[in-house]
Amino acid sequence: MGVELKTPPEEALGVDLGRSELGGITTEFRYLFAGIAVASIWLAIAAASTVLLLRAIGASRLTAAVGFVCLPLLLTGAWYLAGNSMLAALSFAPLIAWLWIRGSFALAGGLLCVGLLFKLNLALVLISAPVAFLLLGVPAGAARSQVARAAAGFGAVLAVGAAFLALRGELHGYLATVIDNVAYSRDVLVETG
């Protein structure tokens, strides 16, 4: 059973679908390949930082190899929706933990900020490892100093991000989107009673 179109797609869309761009690659395929490339970068960051974290806490090579394979599989399962920022933010969680455990508190705080700029509602996931390490006293040192250095890194990245968005005239739109995302669950509850 076939479907007959009354108007050809190129006329309905107002474009020449037969004309390809960039030597035979249409715009849609370029977006598809770009999306796959970006997702691959996030997965590579997650996999590599999982190995670094597991080796830093004394895990065997076998455990690190299993982590290298399993975390990307988990991230592309239940959490991942194409086009969303969930994968980017979640890929930073093991890297934040690794940076914290090796004593790079400012970098961990800065990366925490980047993760939260992608997806604010993952704050508890992203902050969980540093909080656990603080409670365990790992690495050794004054907890107040560690938190202060992480806060400095967080603040520096936040200031740079806000300045960048403000210069581009996109700060208001970004903040409106963040507020809408945070208020979404409350709005659904209000609407549904």
Image: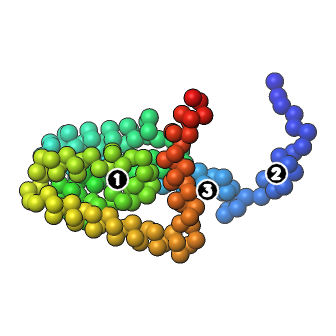
Figure label count: 3
Q: Is residue 88 at least partly visible in the picture?
A: no
Q: Residue at x 66, y 63 (%)?
A: 22
Q: Residues within 10 Å of mark 3 (few under 14, many from 20)?
A: few
Kind of residue at disc 3: Arg
Residues at marks 1 and 3, CA–CA distance in whole angstroms: 26 Å
157, above or below 19, in the image: below
Q: Residue at x 38, y 38 (%)?
A: 73
Kind of residue at disc 1: Phe
Which of the two discs, 1 and 3, sits closer to the camera? 1
Residue 128 spot, x, y in % from top left: 27, 46
131, above or below 111, in the image: above
As drawn, which residue projects farthest toward the left?
140
Disc 1: which residue = 92
Residues at marks 3 and 2, CA–CA distance in whole angstroms: 19 Å
Q: Residue at x 29, y 44 (%)?
A: 68
Q: Helix, strand or loop at disc 2?
A: helix
Instruction: Name the side, left or right, on which 110 lies relative to 82.
Output: left
